[in-house]
């Protein structure tokens, strides 16, 4: 995964942005249940 990012810096920036969006969606979904706390801790 990281090897691809180093080849194309634009791809890594795009990937980072996508990850952020996914995290936001996860967090918003998580407000409903306790699962978000667990997944958040795993990611950190």
Image (cartoon, rainbow, N blue to C red):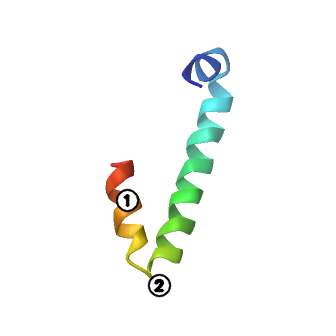
Q: Position of residue 24 (x, y in %)?
A: 52, 65
Residue 6 tag number? none
| Residue 4 sits in quarter | top right
Q: Which residue is found at the position 58% from the left and 58% from the top?
A: 22
- Residue closest to the eye, 5 or 38: 38
> Does residue 5 sit above or below 18 in this rendering?
above
Instruction: Estimate the x, y position of residue 14 in percent, counting from the top left.
Output: 65, 40
Q: Mark 2 packing: few (<14 Cα in 10 Å), some, or many (20+)?
A: few
- Dot 1 corresponds to which residue? 40
Q: Earlier in the sequence, mark 1 or mark 2?
A: 2
- The residue furthest bottom is 32
- Element type where label 1 sits in the image: helix
Residues under labels 1 and 2: Cα distance?
Answer: 14 Å
Q: 39 above or below 17? A: below
The residue drawn where x is 62% and y is 49% is 18
Residue 33 or residue 18, whichever sits in front: 33
Residue found at x 51% / y 75% = 28
Q: Which residue is mark 2?
A: 32
Image quarter where the N terminus lies is top right
Q: Secondary structure at mark 2?
A: loop
Residue 26 in the figure: left or right of residue 33: right
Q: Is residue 5 above or below residue 20?
A: above
Q: Residues within 10 Å of mark 1 (few under 14, many from 20)?
A: few
């Amino acid at each position: 995964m990281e090897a691809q990012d180093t080849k194309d810096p634009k791809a890594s920036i795009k990937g980072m942005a996508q990850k952020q969006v996914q995290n936001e969606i996860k967090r918003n979904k998580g407000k409903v249940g306790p699962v978000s706390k667990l997944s958040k801790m795993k990611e950190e």
